[in-house]
Structure formats: structure tokens, C-alpha cells
Image (spheres, helix red, strand yellow):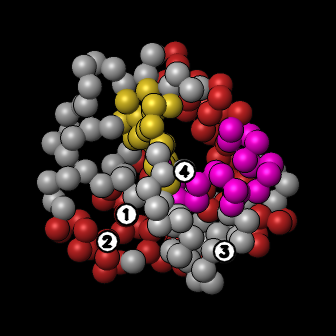
């Protein structure tokens, strides 16, 4: 991961990068804990190299602690996209809902407080008439646990006027 990150940072120096954790980013594969901050040893090893892509200190802490963050969508030069409207990129750690992540079988609450955090992010965007783009790895279709899936879908229904686009990549096919 450190080598791949270095290559991406050097090769795409004029393009903004917004990282999202995948289920193969850990060892053993698929196992991602999110009850306590920074409890994933493998992620702790390589994730600081992604700090260069997450310049906001509060959001970087959220990423390092639980694997999710949000940032205003900007061009690499720092200028905002859009015509005065706030557009936020929200990167979720959707691995915490993945049905083959055996850690999820022991979780009966909002892992890492991610769903509550997402709700708050979307509420703030609603207040300023902003929009959101959501990134994640595991799509919330048939591979997420039921409790997470229901809460996530409830948020997507509630904030469908805010969430304009989402991208997931787990099944190696485009899903928008």
C-alpha cells in the first residue's frame, strides 16, 4: 500500500485524490474493526501515507480512527468546483457492513459512529443547500448487513435531494 500510494501521489500530481478503504486493504482480508479508534494494525501501518490526500486535520483524524472522512470537492489547485454551491465528497468505510467481515457479527451498534456522522454531514449540507458525492467500496446492495443497510438506505431516502451521486467498486463493475 505504501508503494502504491507513492506511485499514485507522484504520477497524479495534478489530480486530486480521494482515497477509500477496500476489503483487500487488510490482513486477514475482509476483517476491518471499527469499534475503537485505530484498532486495525494493518491499516494503522499504511494509512498515514494517505494523509497527503486529506489536508483537513479533523477529517484526517476521522479517517485514521475509523476509515471515513469528508472534504469539500476541490480542484487540485484548491479552487472550489461549482458556482458557489458547496459540494462535499464523503468517503465511507463501507467495509464495516460487509457480510464476510466477521467483525460485523459482533457489532450491534453503529460501528465507529459512521451512520450518525453521515447523518450529521448530510444535515449540514442541507442547511446550506449543498450537495454530496459518496464514495465507498462495498455497495449497500446484497453484501451489507441488514441493520447497516436499513439505516444507510433510510439516509439515502431522506437526503436524496442532497446526495447527487455515489460510486462503489467492490464487485469489480461500475455501479452508480
Quadrant including the N terminus: bottom left
Taking depth in this image into account, of 142 and 88 the one nearest to the observer is: 142
Q: Is residue 69 left or right of residue 95?
A: left
- The residue to which callout 3 is attached is 31
The residue furthest bottom is 28
* Vertical placement of residue 101 versus 55, above or below: below
- The residue to which callout 1 is attached is 50
- The spot of residue 102 in percent (x, y) is 76, 73
* Vertical placement of residue 115 versus 42, above or below: above
Q: Is residue 4 left or right of residue 168?
A: left
Depth check, mark 1 against mark 3: the one in front is 3
Separation (CA) of disc 4 from disc 2: 19 Å
Mark 1 in CB contact with mark 3 (< 8 angstroms): no
Separation (CA) of disc 4 from disc 3: 16 Å
- The residue to which callout 2 is attached is 5
Q: Earlier in the sequence, mark 4 or mark 1?
A: 1
Task: Provide the secondary structure element on which disc 2 rests.
Answer: helix
Q: Can I make out residue 36 in this image?
A: no
Q: Quadrant of residue 106?
A: bottom right
Which residue occupies 68% across, 38% down? 153
The boundaries of the magenta stretch are 135-153
Classify 10 Å Cα crowding around label 2: few (below 14), some (14-19), many (20 and above): some
Mark 4 in CB contact with mark 2 (< 8 angstroms): no
Q: Earlier in the sequence, mark 1 or mark 3?
A: 3
Q: Earlier in the sequence, mark 2 or mark 3?
A: 2
Q: Where residue 92 is drawn, which disc sits there?
A: 4
The question of residue 124 being in magenta is answered with: no
Mark 2 in CB contact with mark 1 (< 8 angstroms): yes
Separation (CA) of disc 2 from disc 3: 21 Å
- The spot of residue 115 in percent (x, y) is 67, 42
Task: Provide the secondary structure element on which disc 1 rests.
Answer: helix
- The spot of residue 62 in percent (x, y) is 53, 51
Amino acid at each position: 500500500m505504501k508503494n502504491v500510494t507513492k506511485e499514485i501521489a507522484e504520477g497524479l500530481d495534478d489530480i486530486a485524490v480521494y482515497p477509500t478503504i477496500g476489503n483487500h486493504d487488510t490482513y486477514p482480508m475482509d476483517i476491518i474493526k471499527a469499534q475503537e479508534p485505530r484498532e486495525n494494525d494493518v491499516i494503522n501501518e499504511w494509512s498515514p501515507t494517505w494523509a497527503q490526500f486529506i489536508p483537513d486535520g479533523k477529517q484526517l483524524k476521522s479517517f485514521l480512527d475509523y476509515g471515513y472522512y469528508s472534504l469539500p470537492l476541490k480542484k487540485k489547485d484548491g479552487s472550489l468546483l461549482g458556482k458557489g454551491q458547496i459540494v462535499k465528497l464523503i468517503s465511507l468505510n463501507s467495509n464495516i457492513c460487509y457480510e464476510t467481515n466477521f467483525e460485523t457479527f459482533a457489532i450491534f451498534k453503529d460501528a465507529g459512529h459512521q451512520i450518525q456522522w453521515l447523518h450529521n454531514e448530510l444535515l449540514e449540507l442541507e442547511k446550506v443547500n449543498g450537495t454530496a458525492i459518496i464514495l465507498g467500496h462495498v455497495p449497500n446492495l446484497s453484501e451489507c448487513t441488514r441493520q447497516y443497510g436499513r439505516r444507510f438506505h433510510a439516509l439515502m431516502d431522506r437526503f436524496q435531494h442532497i446526495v447527487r451521486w455515489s460510486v462503489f467498486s467492490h464487485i469489480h463493475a461500475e455501479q452508480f
